[in-house]
Amino acid sequence: MFDIDFHQLLIAASVWAAPILLAVTLHEAAHGWVASKLGDSTAKDLGRVTFNPFKHIDLFGTILLPAALLLMSGGKYMFGFAKPVPVNFHNLHHPRRDMVLVAAAGPGTNLVIAIVSALLLHVGTYVPEQYQAWVTMNLFNSLWINVVFAVFNLMPLPPLDGGRIAVGLLPQPFSGWLAGVERVGFVILIFILFALPWIGGKLGIDLNVLGWLVGIPAQFLTDVIATITGLK
């Protein structure tokens, strides 16, 4: 059984839910919007180029996974993803180039949200005092989760955005080899996310690969954003 303080859990959920929902919703909407501008209206025709979060919610990635992580970490950690926006790359005006632009739109949007969140922290003192701590925590979490989400998605592993960007930029035969990884890409991600840390825990070895590949770059990028927005 988990020893959980449900009051703290509720507070943690309230300051993580909105930042995560905003991050994944705008990330996916950006993919669809850029694709529609470059010749593919698939996402637009399905109503996925929208800020309505219910159009992007994935039962596992947006609800079950964040809730499970929040519960298992005692309210200290939550992460999730939305339903991927469908894109028919054959409809794009310049499929190879435009695939890179469509893929980059999601992480790029997350970085914009992170910068806006950092700037809004400067006006936190103008919020009524009883709400200041809650609003500030939401903005800090928005800054952090959007940076993490951007860095995570930029890993060069299909089906992540970074994988698609790499496929579009690499010459043949390397791009073809990497594109072929997409069939097992999700399995590799699950292994990295859950299996490796579990195996490392049993062996007494730190195998938290995401901490190295995502956590360290995300912390560096967060420090950069904090500096350029005057938080540091």
Image (cartoon, rainbow, N blue to C red):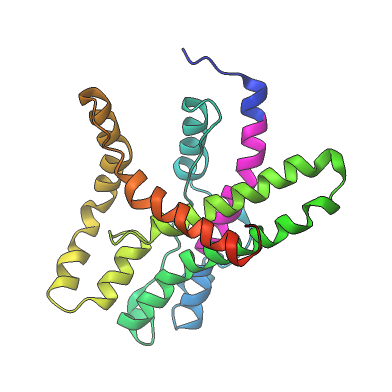
In the displayed structure, would residue 31 be above or below residue 197? below
In the displayed structure, would residue 43 be above or below residue 206? below
Residue 199: horizontal and vertical position, in percent?
A: 23, 29
Mark yes or no: residue 91 visible: yes
64 or 173: which is nearer to us? Answer: 173
Q: Residue furthest front?
A: 232
Residue 29: horizontal and vertical position, in percent?
A: 54, 65
Q: Residue furthest right?
A: 128
Q: Residue at x 21, y 66 (%)?
A: 179
Horizontally, residue 207 falls left or right of residue 133, namely left
Residue 81: horizontal and vertical position, in percent?
A: 47, 49
Task: Check residue 26 for magenta coloring.
Answer: yes
Task: Check residue 92 for magenta coloring.
Answer: no
Q: Residue at x 85, y 38 (%)?
A: 130
Horizontally, residue 152 falls left or right of residue 109, namely left
Q: Residue at x 22, y 51 (%)?
A: 184
**Magenta-tinted stretch:** 11-29
Mark yes or no: residue 45 visible: no
Q: Which quarter of the figure has residue 200?
A: top left
